[in-house]
Image (tube, rainbow, N blue to C red):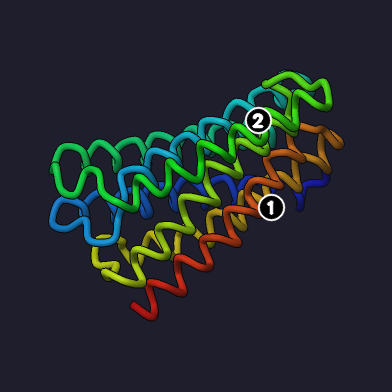
Amino acid sequence: MKITKKLAADLIFVLQICLALISGGSQFLRLLTTSQGVNVSWLASWLTFLLINLALTIRAHRSRPSRVTLQTVLTYGAWSLVIAADLGALLWMGRELWGLTDKVTVGMVGPGVALVCFWAWRRGLGLIDPMVNAGFAMCFIGLPQLTLAYKIFYVGGAGLAGAMLLAGHIGICTRLGQLYFAIKEAGWDRHRLAAALSELANETTWLLVTAAWLVG
């Protein structure tokens, strides 16, 4: 990798760690005062999405180790830790732990995961296949964010920190940048492609959440 691209990849990695701290930290503090609009199922699903992509990037790094692929692993690890902390804060405060929106979320994610399993079975793919994992990740990030946007639109989004919204968009785009650099450095890999597809679904639905937050 050329020195300029290496420097760009390093800067993206540092930015990702900063964004994870800003996003997770601001949301943690917000949840200590209010959880309006925030679902426990959303944070739990988001954490699941991050852990799936963490596993994908770990397997990608093991298949073709490189500096950038390691940075990608550390990035997903950092985001997983801060979202786990946010989920812990919500559970600790004990506000609106389970409601109608959570039931709807589970009612959508469950069949979605089942559909992905059926698709994998028809194609003879195992449950750890990268494309199957991408399908799982899309279910755990896309569907919960649709119900989150709906809830914020109707009840308000005071429980969602504005810094988290902005950091989320920048974080998704720069993670896609990390995956791009990883592909440029280590070549195409189905694990990296799967992670990229899930991040595209993440950004699409996060835009809807942002629109609902701005309107609400």
Residue 43 at least partly seen: yes
Q: Taking 70 as reference, is 18 above or below it?
A: below
Q: Which residue has dot 1 on it?
A: 177
Instruction: In this rendered view, identify the residue nearer to me: 81 or 102.
Output: 102
The local secondary structure at tag 2 comes to helix
The local secondary structure at tag 1 comes to helix
Q: Residue at (61%, 44%) from the top-left corner?
A: 138
Question: Is tag 2's residue or tag 1's residue first in the polypeptide sequence?
Answer: 2
Q: Quadrant of the N terminus?
A: top right
Q: Residue at (80%, 33%) from the top-left corner?
A: 190
Instruction: In this rendered view, identify the residue nearer to me: 74 or 216.
Output: 216
Instruction: In this rendered view, identify the residue nearer to me: 131 or 151.
Output: 151
Q: Which amino acid is tagged 1?
A: Gly
In the rendered view, does 204 fall on the left or right side of 184?
left
**In front of the other: label 2 or label 1?**
2
Residue 71 at least partly seen: no
- List x then y, in percent, for residue 81: 39, 34
- List x then y, in percent, for residue 8: 68, 52
Q: Which residue has dot 2 on it?
A: 57
- List x then y, in percent, for residue 185: 81, 38
Instruction: In this rendered view, identify the residue nearer to me: 30 or 39.
Output: 39
- Quarter of the image where one finds residue 55: top right
